[in-house]
Amino acid sequence: MTRIIVALPKIEDAKSIKNLLVRNGFDVATVCSSGAQVLSQIDNLNDGIVISGYRLPDMLYAELRDYLPGGFEMLLLASKPLLMECTGSNIMCLGMPLKVHDLLNTIEMMTNSIAYKRKKSKAKPKERKPEEVALINEAKCLLMSRNNMTEEEAHRYIQKCSMDSSRNMVETAQMILAVMKS
């Protein structure tokens, strides 16, 4: 679940937004009244949403956004004239006075976006270490020389054996080398 940090200059306003979000099923990690508090809280989180006012006591929203790690998105709450300044800044914006429906829909959209990014990053195949690549290549070379296979056929053979035995390709290559070298 996506964690949310609410950072507004007036702590009472931040708590009100927190209560609204919690009542609607969102996970609010904490409320803060300064940028420094936000930055200390995000050390414990991998990603999330920071709901910020335009001006915090120690920094503007743009400074806070620059300090946020890559997995965090920002929702700026400000008056409509101030929102004109942040066009194209890769920040979601909502005008004040705030409409509950708009806030909830925007947070829902942002949490879905973060969940999609998480899922997409988990789906990426992991990079193999050079020694693992060398092991697979050695097994392919052995299969190519002993069984007159092309490189593609040898690779597919290792892949198929790997899937059939529920092992990864490196373990399968090790098995092939152990069997064929003995």
Image (cartoon, grey):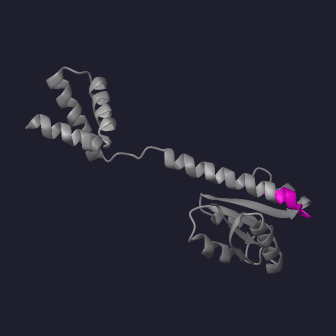
Task: Specify the quadrant of the image occupied by residue 41.
Answer: bottom right
Magenta stretch contains residue 140:
no
Asked if one can make out residue 138 in the rendered structure from this viewpoint, the answer is yes
Residue 108, position in %: x, y? 74, 55
Asked if one can make out residue 91 in the rendered structure from this viewpoint, the answer is no
Residue 15, position in %: x, y? 79, 76
Residue 176's place in the image compared with 48, above or below, is above
Magenta stretch contains residue 102:
yes
Residue that extends furthest to the left in the rendered view of this protein: 182
Residue 10, position in %: x, y? 82, 78
Residue at 68% across / 51% down in the picture?
112
Point out the image quarter for the N terminus.
Answer: bottom right
Taking the image as shown, residue 45 lies to the left or right of residue 177, namely right
Residue at 59% across / 57% down in the picture?
70
Q: How many marks?
A: 0
Of 71 and 176, nearer the camera is: 176
Residue at 10% across / 36% down in the picture?
181
Residue 55, position in %: x, y? 80, 71
Taking the image as shown, residue 81 lies to the left or right of residue 181, namely right
Point out the image quarter for the C terminus.
Answer: top left
Residue 172's place in the image compared with 67, above or below, is above
Taking the image as shown, residue 113 lies to the left or right of residue 182, namely right
Residue at 26% across / 27% down in the picture?
154
Task: Specify the quadrant of the image occupied by residue 92.
Answer: bottom right
Q: Which residues are magenta?
A: 92-103
